[in-house]
Structure formats: structure tokens, C-alpha cells
Amino acid sequence: MNPFNDKPIKRPEEDKFDFSRFAEALAQSIIKNENPEGTVIAIRGPWGSGKSSVVNLVRYYLEKEMEKEMEMEKRRESDQTQKGFEFPRTAPNWLKSLAPKARSKQDSGNTSNSSNVSLKILDFKCWWFKGEEALTLEFFHQLYSALDQSSLEEAKEAMSQLGSIILSGSAPLVGTIVNSMAPGVGEAVSNGMNGLSKLIKQEGTVENLYKKISQGLENQDKRYLMIIDDIDRLSPDEALLIFRLVKSVGQLPKITYLLAYDREVAEKIVSERYPSEGAHYLEKIVQAGFDIPYPLRSDLIGAFKKSVEELWKEPKNSIYWKEYQDLESRHFRNLFDNVVEPQIQSPRDIIRIMNTLKVTWPAVANEVDPADFLALETLRVKQPKLYAILKAYKQQLTGIYMGPSNENNNSRASRYEDIFVRDLQDEKRADMKKALRCLFPPLDSVWNTSILPVDREECQRQRRACSPEHFDTYFRFSLSQETINLAEVQAVIKNSGNKARVENVLLQAIQNQTGNGRRAYASVLLDELKVHAKSIPIENAKSFLSALFSVYDRIDTDIDQSGDSMRIYFLLKNLLLNCTNLDKRLAIIVDVIQYASLYLTIFITLRIYREYHPLLGEFPEPEENCLIAKSDMDYLHRISAEKVKTAIENDELLCSREPLNILDNWNLLARSDKSEEAKSWCMGKLSDDNAVEIFAKGLMLERRESTAIDSEYITYLINMNILRRFFDIQQLKQRVEQLLNVSEPTSKRHVILKRFLDAFNECRDIDQ
């Protein structure tokens, strides 16, 4: 079969699965059977195994044999002609000169054509015809057309009468059937049978008519091969009709039948209609049955890999193609061996999968991991029910949500089996679970006792299906609403040395949201830059980071709550860690931190501090994995503490994000107790309505909890540590109550103040 084409092959040079030798042997058997008596040969194989291709190859080899026969016949005639005009050596020369003219005259009366060939192929395309009457009519039409010599007029007449008798027994309105056919065919058959309505009244018996046809065929040299392919495409009644016709009327001398069908389907049809006979019914009809030779597994898989490779080469700028040119790469091999290869059982499987890929792959070629996409598209074609389930369980497959926290491992494993592999046979479940673990590594935590950590950043960089940001792209055949085009990321990287240009791209990104509206476009861009940071040339680091720090406060929006500051920290780490030494990293950070806002400066300083002084239960990083040397931390702390002091002096602290948290970390940064200065500043701001709203919001902590039915709700607590350190509690409460009473009930301020007082009143740790 040809790539991307469901048509069967016609010539040996198209054969990728070594069907040709079998077809040639079959053709030789047909040629050498000089006296067939309605011999029936069957080519049997399941749907998609290549039966029609084998039939075409048999036809090809038969036609080649007939061409040889015609050529030999021409040579024999030529030799006889030349021999007839030989003159004695003693004949005069003028007489010998007449020989070529005489030969030419004789040759003109002995032209060879296809009628001299000893085998004629009749092609009965049974699935073109609907209904038993139409099939019967076409069967007789094929036999009638075989009687194409002038010496067979009596046999032709008998065939016409026999057909009309049989047709009249199965369909009274034979004339209607004939007229319903294509005009040319209907008219030809009608004329050839000399009017069915008249012939029905003929007195010749079936036995006499059949005898005349047989005698006519026996008295000629020509043989016939009727090819009947795709019998398993017919309805059960129509398929049984074909077998009955071949077995009864078709048992004529000089005729061979080549049938092609799915053995399992045919035997099931027969068993349902004739339970007592079952498969024996077909054995009585078919003299020689051959199961189609199954392609070598290596040929089948090799042809598929070659087709995939050619497809992946089509988008020349495919970013991952270089990583996949070697088909033995570990990731490709794991997915191919465990997911793809088990689904390929026949040449048609290759055609179906490749036809699907040809449509879907170009739309996402640069936006997905090729091996993941190949695996999922294979499942879409071969396991559509499983594919639909995978599409519906994004959170479980990407590790966002694996189930209730109190669920034990065995219960979770059993629940996941019910979701994903319940419909599979027991012997196939283990293999499919392994396949899904290769495709979605988070499932290792459910089905595998030895769990390897999932490198989520690497999965995101490769745009794997297990990445939440890219999962939807695989099932929508368009860019996921949670990510952006890779070309846009590459454009930023390409221009990373141009500070103004990077700033402009980031500021433009503020204006947009992702397709689902849940995330700011700028945040998604930061996510992608974070995982592709290693692609940014280190010589562009200062320009790129300066631009990023300069616009941070404007791109950090309320739409996305997952933390642009954390994204920038990891971007900074991914960019600098493997490309610079400690001294170089310090120089770059000190140089670019001046462009950062107060909040971002404090955040990055504290994150670097936590590399050496982690929270309880965590371990410190070795110095080579830290952004700066431990001995340089004081320098970075002084820069940050000075920024806090300047913001207080210039009355700019309220404009910063999370001013109370900044004050809470001031002691650590300044290496001294700044609590009194911080409290003095906070109490001095209580007369400012905006400050009261900001303080109320900053003093609340969110706590998210799940219900028994997995829905989530939020409760609010008061940060007592900051409240006691920086405020007179009763004065703050009174000020909040005053402002609440005068605020608009539908305003955002009213909601914040009301929420604060509710949490405050619920708190039992406050001396009221």
C-alpha cells in the first residue's frame, strides 16, 4: 500500500511486505491449470491485511504471462511465414526478390490480438452492486461476456435463457432491475439476453441450458478467471449469494474463480445461517484456500518508521526534528515500543495512522513533542474509547490532582485502573498501564512502586503531553489556551540583547490574556522563557534581565495568582547557573537589581538567602547550585535594606506590593531590629483610608480546604504575628469599622474590610 493512500498496490515495485512471491506462485498455479472445472481459489485474511493488494499482484503476474504468450505467438507466426517463402538455392535471384512482398501480404492477414490469449480475466466488483438481484444479474453478465467468440452463439443464447430463469425465480420484476442499472450496462445486458420477459417463457430446462453452456466452453481453447474481491464488504445475505452462485451455476468448465474475503467473517456468516455445517460449508466450495502471508514484523515496523520520518521532515523549521532524527533516542524508543508498536498489526493500520497524522501533524508541528503526539494519534485511531478517556482526565494525567489526600495507594491504583484500562482484557491491562506511564510520567506515582521524580520544567520545555500547559494542544490540534506559540518565545530569545525590544514585548503581553481568560499572557510568556532560559546567550543576560526587572510591577497582575516573582527567580537561576561562575553571577545580579522594584528586590534576595538557610524540613543547597556565594549575601542584604529605608523616607512603601511583608523581613535584611520603626510608620498611616484597606488585606491569610465531594472553599485567618508587631490592635479594628460603615456596600473595599472583621471576630487568639 502506498503511503497516505488507502488504495491497494498494483505492481511488485510498490510491495513493501513481500506479497509478490506469494502472488506470483498463485498466478503460476492458475496458468498451469489447463482444464479447470469451476475451480475456486480463495485468498483469506482479516480486514486491512492486504488481500486486494495480493489480488492485484496476481493479476499483474497473469498479465505478464499473457504478454509473454502473445509475444511467443507472434514469433511462431513470423517463423512460419518466413519458412513458407524459402526458395531453393538454385532459384533465380529475381524470384527470391519477390519473397518480402509475399511475406508482407501474408502478414497482413494474420494479425495477433488479445483474442488469441488463452486466459481472459473477468472482474466481478461485487460490492458495487446492492441487493441479491443486482448481484445475480452482474454475475451472469460477467459469464455472458466471457462467451465472446462467434462459435459460441448457441452457448450465449443458453446463458441468456439460464440467467432469465434464475432471475425470474428470485425477482419477478427483472426488467425493472435491468433498467435501474447504468443506461449503457442495462441496455447491453438487456439486448444481450434478447429481452428477459420473452426468455422467461422459453421451454428449455436448466439442465439442458447448462449442458449447452458447458459444451460450448469445452470446445474452445480459452480459459477464464473471475476475480471476486471484497466479499466481506457485502451484507450476510449478499455474501452467501456469491458463494451459492459460484458453487452452483458457476461450476463450468474452463473457469477458475479467485475469491478474496475475511475467513473469520465469512465463517461467522455461514455458521449463523447454516449452524449444522459451519465452516464445512465453505470447504465444499473452495478447492484451494490460502491465508494471506503475514508481513514480517520488521518490515511492517520499518515501513511505519520510514513514513513517520518522512512526515517529520516536512516542516523544515520543526524545532524538535534534530532531537528525533535518530529514531533510537530514548524518549522516542520508549513511547514507540510501548505505545505505538503494539497497535500496528497490519499494513492498513499504517495507512490509517499516517493518513491521520498527515492531517493533524502540520497544524501543531512546532508546538508538541513529536513522540508524544505520535503515541496519542496512534491511540486515537486504534483505541478511540481510551483516547476519549485520556482527553477527559487532564488533571490526573498531568499530576495537577491525583485524588483525595487521605486515599491509600492501593485504592488509588485500583481507581485509576477502573478509569483508564477497565475495558481491556486482563492480559492487555499491564501492557497498557506501562504504555500510559511512559506517556504520562505522573502515573508512576499511582502504578509503580519505584517512583522517579518528574522533571516538570523539562516536560514543559519539550511541550510534552504530561505538561498541564500543553496537554490541550494534543487533543484540540491547535495551540492550547494555556500556552503561546513557540515562535513568539524564540523571537524574544533572538532579541534578548535588545533591552527596549524585550520591554516592549512584555508590555504588549500585559494587554492580552490566554484563551481561557484564567492567566495573563505575560505570565504564560514568563513560564515559557523560564523553561527555555538556557537558550538565551549569556552575553545578553544583563540586557534581558534589566528589561524584565524594569517592567515586572506592570506585568504582575491579579489575574494570575501563581507568582510571576517566582517565575522570574527560576528564570534567573536557569539562565545563570550553568553558564557562569559565582563571581560572574554576582556581578550580573548586582548590576540588574537596580532596575527591580522594591518588592522584586526583596523577593529575589530572600530566595537566594533560602538557598543557604532553607525552611524547616528542607536542606541547604551546595554553593555551586546557588546564585551567589554565601559570603556575598551581606552585600545583597544591604542593597535590599537600603531600598526599604528609602521607600519609607520617600513615602513610597504603600505603592509597593505587600508592604507589610516587606516590613516583616526588614529585620533580616538590615541585620537589626526595625520593629519599632515599622510600627511607627504603620500607625502613622491609619489616617489614610487607602492604607487601612491595604493593611486589612495584607493581614489576612487564605486557607483553602476541600469538601467530601472534592469542591474547594476558602477561609480567611489573621496574621497575628504582623498584627501584634506593627499595630495597636484595637485602634486598627476601630479604624476598619469606621471605614466599613462609610464604604459602598458593592465596592471591593467593603468586601475586604468586611472579610477582615469577620476573620478578626473569629480569631480566639486576640485579647478584645
Image (cartoon, rainbow, N blue to C red):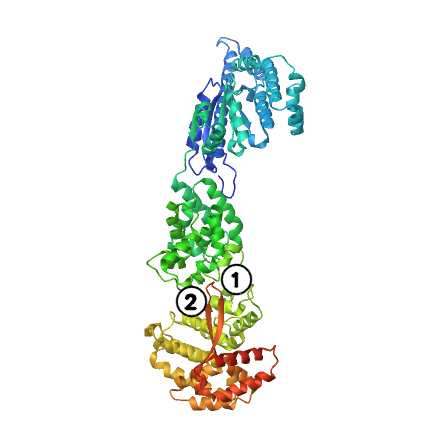
Residue at 37 percent across and 84 percent down: it is 634
Q: Are marks 1 and 2 in contact (CB under 8 Å)?
A: no
Asked if one can make out residue 469 in the rendered structure from this viewpoint, the answer is yes
Vertical arrangement, residue 756 with respect to residue 442, above or below: below
| Label 1 sits on residue | 485
- The picture places residue 694, in percent across and down from the top left corner, at 52, 82
Q: Amino acid at mark 1?
A: Asn
- The picture places residue 103, in percent across and down from the top left corner, at 55, 15
Quadrant in which residue 192 is drawn: top right
| Label 2 sits on residue | 534
Vertical arrangement, residue 196 with respect to residue 92, above or below: below
Q: Amino acid at mark 2?
A: Lys
Q: Give whichever of 672, 416 is nearer the camera.
A: 416
Label 2, residues with CA under 10 Å away: few <14, some 14-19, many ≥20? some
Residue at 55 percent across and 27 percent down: it is 124
Give how far apart the Cα atoms at labels 1 and 2 are: 18 Å
Label 1, residues with CA under 10 Å away: few <14, some 14-19, many ≥20? some
Q: Give whichever of 426, 398 is nearer the camera.
A: 426
- The picture places residue 28, in percent across and down from the top left corner, at 44, 25
- The picture places residue 212, in percent across and down from the top left corner, at 56, 13
Q: Left or right? Give the position of 513 relative to 567.
A: right
Residue at 43 percent across and 49 percent down: it is 422
Vertical arrangement, residue 166 with respect to residue 497, above or below: above
- Secondary structure beneath dot 1 equals loop
Residue at 41 percent across and 34 percent down: it is 293
